[in-house]
Amino acid sequence: MNSDAARVRKSVRVTGTVQGVGFRPFVYSLAARLGLAGFVGNDSEGVFAEIEGSPAAVAEFLVAVERDAPPLARVGQVVSTSMRPNGSAGFTIAPSAPGAQRTALVSADSAMCADCLAELRDPADRRYRYPFINCTNCGPRFTIVADVPYDRPNTTMAPFAMCKRCAAEYHDPANRRFHAQPVCCPACGPRLSLRSAGGSPRAAGEPLAAAAALLRDGQVLAVKGLGGYHLAVDARSEAAAAALRARKHREDKPFAVMAAGLAAARELGEVDETAAALLTSPRRPIVLLPRLPGAVAAAVAPGNRTLGVMLPYTPLHQLLLEAVGGPIVLTSGNISDEPIAYRDEDAFERLAAIADAFLTHDRAIHIRTDDSVVRVWGGGEVVIRRSRGYVPEPVTTAHRFPRPVLACGAELKNTFCLASADRAFVSHHIGDLENAATLRSFTEGIEHFGRLFGIEPQVVAYDLHPEYLSTKYALDLGLDSCGVQHHHAHIASCLADNGHDGPVIGVAFDGTGYGTDGTLWGGEFLVADLAGFERAGHLEPVPMPGGAAAIRQPWRMAAAYLRAAFPGGPPPGLDVVKRNERNWAAITSMAERRVNAPLSSSAGRLFDAVAALLSVRDTINYEGQAAVELEQLADPGETGSYRVAISDGPSFRIQGASLVQTAAGELTEGAPAPVIAARFHNGIAALIEEGCVLAAERHGLDTVALSGGVFQNLLVTGRAVARLEARGFRVLLHSRVPCNDGGISLGQAVVAGARDRAG
Ligand SMILES: [Zn+2]
Ligand SMILES: [Zn+2]
């Protein structure tokens, strides 16, 4: 044995997502393998350890602690300081200590791991077919944590006292369940129950088998998941899917489907390598796949070329899917646009008129979290809704926030963001902030995040729209406030997503956002960096006859655009005019006289106008529907394009009406609608290119950031990127946060941070 003089001792601090992910047992076994003495523990800042041994072993430890970290860990930093060796022997795990600071990161919920799945299927295992099986490497996290540090008493597992066998596993450093806070078994853990529509327990029968039988019988089942209640029906039953639509008051918006496994998913949609990796990842998002015909009932996703598919992420889902023997619709448990139900009593009440029965259990959900939605683009992942499985993992920012920031987001698809140091915690999907229920989840969510991550904001960022509930909330806080224009926030969000500082040419195309001039913007070319922007150009504003009514009724936008395109009256024979003959003159004159017809440069409204012109849809049932269906209609093989006129000025104006003029002309000449739809899309890509070239000439920039809900349209995005890259531009797109308003809060936060840095 070497003399003690050769020994070194170091105090080690590991930050990042290192709690609830098996980090302490990992450190314990690493230290044991290297023959190190000392201890490891959790506190509110992360994991701390002291290690003592030979210099080589200590050095190896400091490398391996990051390199070999457990699968769910996200190591931020490893900081070590030298100490005087004290000759201690053995390695121990210290109990958690409550601390003053709370910067340790709670991890996201994670799908059942392969080891747990194997136990679930093993008749000899004591957790055989137990719907709440989990371990250090998988299971519920964010949705069950009420406070930090992440320890069982601070989770919704607190009421379940571990049985002897579970406790033995929990305390055994060699066990996969060592310090797994939600560890449980049939003897001591949560239990499943099947309840009737009123919430009272149903008599007799094994709940899972009975629930599966109900689904096979075409009934609507409410299922308690990780982040809330879902509504489920047999995805192959036309009648069941139609009944669910009718009861949920959801006319057209597509439902997501859960398939038992990858093979089953391949029967529903085209699954490439990237999609397969996303479907089976521990995050388990809904992945939008090119749909295979006839695999599910038409009513599941009417008129849609894509289908949202996910795989089971809890053992309960796994058992249910296997028992049903086919794909099931799994859509959020709510009526229309209310937030998803997650508390049992609330679910029993609100979903009573929709569900025929409830498959539920007695482990509470602490925070409501919707499923995440992603799609594959260019061989990578594009996040459309960032929620379960992703949240609360922070987005690391290139610059530190001088003071903690709360960014309150936008009105639709709201998220908020709490940021401090170099981390931005973008919240789970809150929803549309239009009613008391969503506003409550917004305010409660902000408090919860503040507590979990120990962030007390000193600066609040908000959208300029004076009527947004998020704006009103922000201004009521009495903190230093920072108003951020909606489209600047979009571009800043894209910059943060890419770790870019700007300046760039930012193309922000969406439905609507409040402009600095008090009009509604949405077809914007900005020259922007994180701190500020200049409006380089935009779509020519067009009146929205009836204001918000024009958003719900795209034919009104057709009327407004046709008036702009054909001042002497539209060409005869247009179906959109015939269908709306009774109100056409009144709406046109409303646009002309600018009475209750606010001006908007929105790109979304231009898509609406063309959708109505091509008889895709005169009125919508969900946000963005007309544009989504117009994209579906377009012939992807068509390469022809419409040209736009551009009016010059300090801020150039692109005449969207010229696209409508050409489209209407071709329509009356008998061109097929799919060809016109494609040429319109190509025309949008072309005008993006032209706008960027103009902006580049004036401002000398060669990088373009694309953001805003319009870029969820892959046809436009694909064609625009191809054109821009052919022109030599570098193009920044979103990947980690949505390009839609779900990404706005991150953009607001980094703008506030940049302005704070500038003083
Ligand atoms: Zn596991
Ligand atoms: Zn147990």
Image (spheres, grey):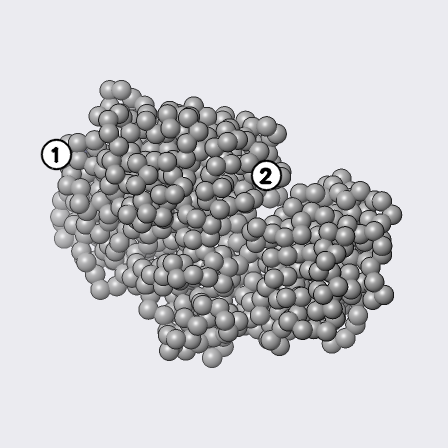
Amino acid carrying label 2: it is: Pro
Residue at (54, 42) in percent of width and height: 254
Residue at (62, 69) in percent of width and height: 520
Tell me the distance, in whole angstroms, between the alpha carbons under discs 1 and 2: 52 Å
Residue at (56, 59) in percent of width and height: 494
Tell me: 281 left or right of 55: right
> Which residue is the extreme one toward the front?
582
Image height check: is 122 above or below 269? above
Residue 211's quadrant in the figure?
A: top left
Q: Are marks 1 and 2 in contact (CB under 8 Å)?
A: no
The yes-or-no answer for disc 1 within 8 Å of ligand 2 is: yes
Disc 2 designates what residue?
A: 302
Amino acid carrying label 1: it is: Lys
Disc 1 designates what residue?
A: 164
Question: Which percent across, then down, holds residue 608?
Answer: 67, 55
Image height check: is 519 above or below 726? below
Question: Which percent across, then down, holds residue 467?
Answer: 50, 71
Residue at (64, 71) in percent of width and height: 596
Question: Which percent across, then down, holds residue 604?
Answer: 65, 58
Q: Is residue 202 visible?
A: yes
Q: Earlier in the sequence, mark 1 or mark 2?
A: 1
Tell me: 354 left or right of 556: left
* Tag 2 secondary structure: loop
Q: Quadrant of the N terminus?
A: top left
Work out whether residue 467 or residue 7 is closer to the camera in this orientation and state it: 467
Number of marks in picture: 2
Q: Is residue 274 visible?
A: no
The yes-or-no answer for disc 2 within 8 Å of ligand 1 is: no
Label 2: how many residues lie within 10 Å, few (<14), some (14-19) or many (20+)? some
